[in-house]
Image (cartoon, helix red, strand yellow):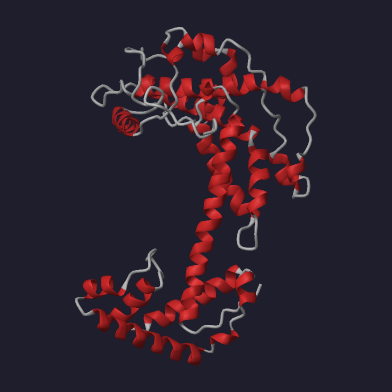
Amino acid sequence: MNDAGRNRPSNSQVSTRERSPVVLPPRRPRWMSSAELEEALRFAQNRSSVSVDCDRSELVRLTKQFLRRETAFISHPAHNNPSAGKEIFSTPLDLQGSAKGSKSRVPKSVADMPIHFGRMCQTTLLTPDQERMLFQRMNYLLQQAEAHRRQLNPSRPSRVRLEVIDQLIAMAEWHRDRLVEANLRLVFSIVKKFVNPNHTFEELLSDGIVALIRAVEKFDFDRGFRFSTYATQVIRRNAYRTVVTQQQERQKTIGGFQDMDLDVTEETRESAISEKRWHELRSRLNRMLSLLDRRERFIIRTRFSLGPHRKVYTLQYLAQRLGVSKERVRQLERRAMDKLRTMVDDAALGDLDLAI
């Protein structure tokens, strides 16, 4: 098994129910005033959800809201040290300095794409030390937020503690965003390989970025290998799953059309139906199904996995659901299919252009 496969938090590493300082004061910790956190703190203050004008009822509501939202993080033994905050934020991260010292250029993976994609990938790559520091700081901030969250009490709401929790979570998100920005080009290089007529680059890119964020939140920075090793596996697996799942759904739909004697040629199957034509075809099919009686409509939808039904059911299962014999279900299915064929002829579905 490779390192990426082993990157699953063990019971001693997982997040939210682990060792934390037993008592935390309801005031802002001194290390939060570190110069290393100035930019992250400005980000947190701009999006704060705790107002200084909150009355007691609002504080109680916010306290209950925070208590329902457990904070997940990857723990580390050193984070339980009372002086951990001061030590973690004492070393300069120097993201701006490394950006000035490097040339801003568009990566080869997006060189032939629209300019706004290139701008998304111009963030300077992180050094191993910067990457480790960002992950450590993000998880430490989340662990401190969880420690404060556990001490909330709706009967004695504390605005100061709520502000501290809110700021800690926001600052952790600021560090997460830096990690995401620095690894966007990895997403571009991977999802480009999965683009096909049925899956646009923009769609796969959106899913890939979500997978990247998830990978950042679950990565254990203390395993000793680079984040890209783990993220590559997560993003590639996510893109593959997206493509395969949609292809399976499309094949099931095409199979249903063939069973209704609709002409779906190999040429049509290999090309992509435009979105507009696809919705029009589905709309017409739904109108035809609405003309069947309740049992016939149910049988057709379940036999061909249409609508909310994600599984093709057997005749025996439908017989049990409808309280009739298996042969009666087969007769009802045949009658419904005959009706649909007649509707197809009457509606002249041949005028529906299924080509691109």
- Image coords of residue 295 (percent x, y): 28, 79
Quadrant in which the C terminus is drawn = bottom right
The image shows residue 306, relative to residue 97, as above or below, that is below
Residue 43 lies in quadrant: top right
Q: Residue at x 58, y 45 (%)?
A: 236
- Image coords of residue 261 (percent x, y): 49, 84
Query: Would you say residue 284 is visible in this rendering?
Result: no
**In this rendering, position of residue 257 left or right of residue 189:** left
Count of number-bearing discs:
0
Q: Residue at x 42, y 86 (%)?
A: 340
The image shows residue 186, relative to residue 196, as above or below, that is above
Seen as rendered, the residue at the extreme left is 323
- Image coords of residue 245 (percent x, y): 50, 58
Q: Residue at x 65, y 55 (%)?
A: 195
Q: Residue at x 54, y 85 (%)?
A: 349
The image shows residue 181, relative to residue 307, as above or below, that is above
Along the viewing direction, whichever of 321 and 67 lies nearer the viewer: 321
Query: Would you say residue 300 is visible in this rendering?
Result: yes
The image shows residue 148, relative to residue 342, as above or below, that is above
- Image coords of residue 110 (percent x, y): 74, 45
Seen as rendered, the residue at the extreme top is 83
Along the viewing direction, whichever of 27 and 296 lies nearer the viewer: 296
